[in-house]
Image (tube, grey):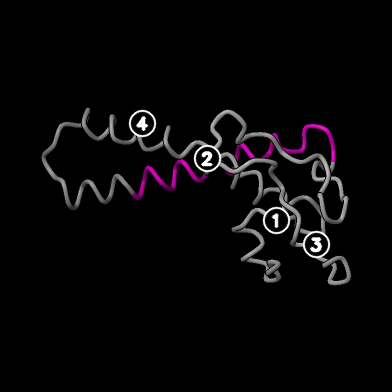
């Protein structure tokens, strides 16, 4: 069943124009290839990199994800695990952030493409 809603397509990493083709070639679980994107949408053939260097701006989105995560986890640790070593917290933060690199990388690019790529959804492409 093809993704038709905006949120569903965004969460599944689908093309913003047709909401059917995948943005990334491989699943995030293939750690050696999680960064490889399709140059064009396999369904509607739109270019997924609107201009050279377009995704450099997604670093700001990735930074925002990281800060939001660290603030949330800091509040959680402060409330539920008080009086522990700060080195324990730092170690846990680093381990979780390394584990989340593929997710952070992918969704920062997907969100950046959806919000700033200038690609609009076309129902006839679906």
Q: Secondary structure at mark 4?
A: helix
Dominant SS type (magenta): helix
Mark 4 Cα shell of 10 Å, populated few (<14), some (14-19), many (≥20): few
Q: Going 50% across and 45% down the picture, which residue do you hit?
A: 65
The answer to which of 76 and 125 lies nearer the viewer is 125
Mark 1 Cα shell of 10 Å, populated few (<14), some (14-19), many (≥20): many
Q: CA distance from mark 2 to mark 4?
A: 19 Å
Query: Label 3 belongs to which residue?
Result: 18
Query: Label 1 belongs to which residue?
Result: 14
Which image quarter holds the N terminus?
A: bottom right
Q: CA distance from mark 2 to mark 1?
A: 17 Å
Whether the residues at callouts 3 and 1 have beta carbons within 8 Å, the answer is yes
Q: CA distance from mark 4 to mark 1?
A: 29 Å
Q: Secondary structure at mark 1?
A: loop
Q: Position of residue 73 (x, y in %)?
A: 32, 46
Indicate which disc residue 29 carries. Answer: 2
Whether the residues at callouts 3 and 4 have beta carbons within 8 Å, the answer is no
Indicate which disc residue 94 carries. Answer: 4
Q: Give the quarter of the image for residue 24.
A: top right
Mark 3 Cα shell of 10 Å, populated few (<14), some (14-19), many (≥20): many
Report the side of 4 relative to 66 (left or right): right
């Amino acid at each position: 069943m093809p993704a038709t809603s905006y949120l569903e397509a965004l969460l599944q990493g689908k093309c913003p124009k047709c909401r059917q083709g995948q943005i990334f070639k491989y699943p995030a679980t293939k750690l050696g290839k999680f960064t490889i994107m399709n140059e064009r949408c396999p369904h509607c053939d739109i270019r997924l990199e609107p201009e050279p260097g377009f995704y450099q701006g997604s670093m700001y989105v990735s930074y925002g994800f990281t800060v939001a995560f660290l603030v949330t986890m800091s509040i959680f640790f402060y409330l539920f695990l008080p009086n522990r070593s700060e080195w324990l917290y730092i170690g846990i933060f680093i381990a979780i952030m390394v584990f989340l690199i593929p997710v952070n990388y992918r969704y920062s690019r997907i969100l950046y493409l959806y919000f700033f790529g200038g690609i609009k959804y076309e129902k006839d492409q679906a």
